Amino acid sequence: MSAAPKSPGPMNPSPVNPCPTNTRLHTLGPVDQIPLGEGRAFGVDGEQVAVFRLRDGTLRALSAVCPHRGGPIADGTIDRQVVICPLHQHAFDLETGCSRTGAEPLRAYSVREDAEQNIVLHNEMNDVEN
Ligand code: FES
């Protein structure tokens, strides 16, 4: 059996763009404005985003308005895995935004601390409809 001749591949072997979507980076100020174990809401591209600083110092970010009845997610109680909405106690996974109690999900954002101890939020705009 003979193998089919291989055609030369494209001359552009460049890897996938490391920032493939319309991602905007937002620096939201120093991490220590958020006490350990708490959250704060920030306005980002016209949306409210809740940023949480876990007790181990890591950051998580979710949309700040509860899909149940608009509760303030940044004021919720957190542990290492979930935030509990303060109004009716729906629980949301801090990594994915998925509800563990049957509510609609929250949007999850990528967030990190930079070398200057500032909060840097990545807002992917690829789901914006025209
Ligand atoms: S508004 Fe969040 S659980 Fe009802």
Image: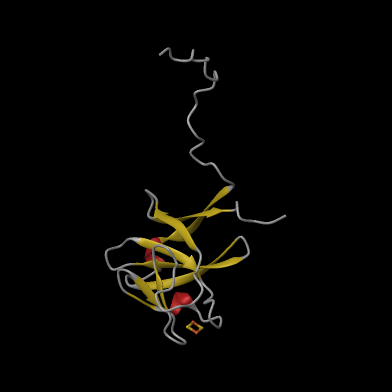
* Left or right relative to 39: residue 80: left
Q: How is the image coloured?
A: secondary structure
Q: Residue at x 30, y 62 (%)?
A: 57
The residue most toward the front is 1
Q: Residue at x 61, y 60 (%)?
A: 45
Residue 27 vs residue 8, the one in the foreground: 8
Where does the image place residue 31, in percent across and percent down from the top left?
39, 62
Count of numbered circles in the view: 0
The residue most toward the bottom is 88
Q: Residue at x 57, y 45 (%)?
A: 21
Residue 34 vs residue 14, the one in the foreground: 14
The residue most toward the right is 130
Q: Where 63 falls versus 9 (above or below)?
A: below
Residue 51 in sight here: yes
Residue 119 in sight here: no
Residue 122 vs residue 57, the one in the foreground: 122
* Left or right relative to 56: residue 99: right
Q: Quadrant of the C terminus?
A: bottom right
Residue 87 vs residue 32, the one in the foreground: 87
Q: Quadrant of the N terminus?
A: top left
